[in-house]
Image (cartoon, grey):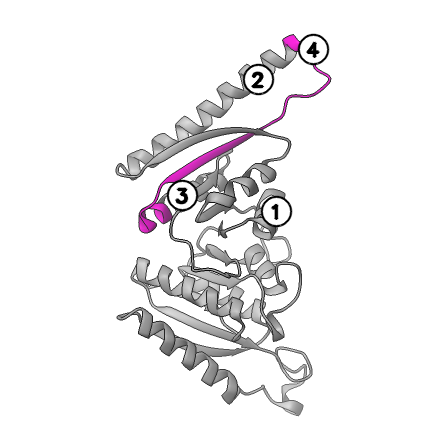
């Protein structure tokens, strides 16, 4: 199945920046690009409760023109890129989550307008980052050109979710022709420890970090022998603090996801949530691919 790269577009500057990131990702992956606009019924719902009374809302001409103009601009900048546009009756978040079942990657901007506006990050971005069925790239607003320099940074903690994040991060680093930084964060030594306990705890923490990083780096180097890989152990009060700080010099941060099955139960871990909300660069949430129909 030739899964497309999907991006939500509502005409806002943030969504157009996301569309440019999505176009670059589609070119890197040799995949088609789908521009999707999820629109709401005039009363505020995706589809009327009684469609026999009101009818399913029709796509709007204004939104279609916006999508077609965005597609034309992208194909001008990326010759050879195949772009499809589509309006979907439903809330933007729900539309993109459904599209993610058949997508290679879903890209969302961190803010939008109309149906795409909402929380600190943006309600749609938050929904898709939490509930996507494939990797989700959350793009920051850009007052400057899209950064191409800087490494891809990924956290390592030995979990299955982090292992998937490391694999996707290595793939991204290869596509971007940049370095990969594997970062393991261990907690700061407790203040009430006596000096001997602090030294013993530090030694054990250093050994654990070295083992986790070496194992992850070994797998990456076996799969991607030409990739530059740096192992970076860090000590911090909270893992999210260290990762957010590391994102300041990065082109991309990749984080794992954590779910418990079912739409209502799918949740990002606290570290992933913090990165999605506060990282200084784009964030890739490493959801596993759902089996396509």
- The residues tagged by marks 3 and 4 sit, at their Cα atoms, a distance apart of 38 Å
The residue singled out by tag 1 in the image is: 274
Q: Foreground mark, 3 or 2? A: 3
Dot 3 falls on a residue whose secondary structure is loop
Question: For mark 1, does the 10 Å Cα neighbourhood hold few (<14), some (14 to 19), or many (20 or more) residues?
Answer: some
Disc 2 is placed on an element classified as: helix
Q: Earlier in the sequence, mark 1 or mark 2?
A: 2
Q: How crowded is mark 2: few (under 14 residues within 10 Å), some or many (20 or more)?
A: some
Taking the magenta stretch, the answer to whether it contains residue 190 is yes
* Rendering coords of residue 66 (x, y %): 47, 81
Q: How far apart are marks 3 and 2 (CA)?
A: 28 Å
Asked if disc 4 and disc 2 are in contact, CB closer than 8 Å, the reply is: no
The N terminus appears in which quarter of the rendering?
bottom left
Q: How far apart are marks 1 and 3 (CA)?
A: 20 Å
Residue 265 position in % (x across, y down): 63, 53
Identify the mark nearer the N-term, 1 or 3.
3
Residue 226 seen in the current view:
yes
Q: Residue at x 62, y 63 (%)?
A: 122
Quarter of image, res 120 = bottom right
Is residue 176 a member of the stretch shown in magenta? yes
Question: Dot 4: what SS?
Answer: loop
Residue under label 3, please give it.
151
In the picture, the disc for residue 202 is 2
Q: Residue 194 carries which label?
A: 4
């Amino acid at each position: 199945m030739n899964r497309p790269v999907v991006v939500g577009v509502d005409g806002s500057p943030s969504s157009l920046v996301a569309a440019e990131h999505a176009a670059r990702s589609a070119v890197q992956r040799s995949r088609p690009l789908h521009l999707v606009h999820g629109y709401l019924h005039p009363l505020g719902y995706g589809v009327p409760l009684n469609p026999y009374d009101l009818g399913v809302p029709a796509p709007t001409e204004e939104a279609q023109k916006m999508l077609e103009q965005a597609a034309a601009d992208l194909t001008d900048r990326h010759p050879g890129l195949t772009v499809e546009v589509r309006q979907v009756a439903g809330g933007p978040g729900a539309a993109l989550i459904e599209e993610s079942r058949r997508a290679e990657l879903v890209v969302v901007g961190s803010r939008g307008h109309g149906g795409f506006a909402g929380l600190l990050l943006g309600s749609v971005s938050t929904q898709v980052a939490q509930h996507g069925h494939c990797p989700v790239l959350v793009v920051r607003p850009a007052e400057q050109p899209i950064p191409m320099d800087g490494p891809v940074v990924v956290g390592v903690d030995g979990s299955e979710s982090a292992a998937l994040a490391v694999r996707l991060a290595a793939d991204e680093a290869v596509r971007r022709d940049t370095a990969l930084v594997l970062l393991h964060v261990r907690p700061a030594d407790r203040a009430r420890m006596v000096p001997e306990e602090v030294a013993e705890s530090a030694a054990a923490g250093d050994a654990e970090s070295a083992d986790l990083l070496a194992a992850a780096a070994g797998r990456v180097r076996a799969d991607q022998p030409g990739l530059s890989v740096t192992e970076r152990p860090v000590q911090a009060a909270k893992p999210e603090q260290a990762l957010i700080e590391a994102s300041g010099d990065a082109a991309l941060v990749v984080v794992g996801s954590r779910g418990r099955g079912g739409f209502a139960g799918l949740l990002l871990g606290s570290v992933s949530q913090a990165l999605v909300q506060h990282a200084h660069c784009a964030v890739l949430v490493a959801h596993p691919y759902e089996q396509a129909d």
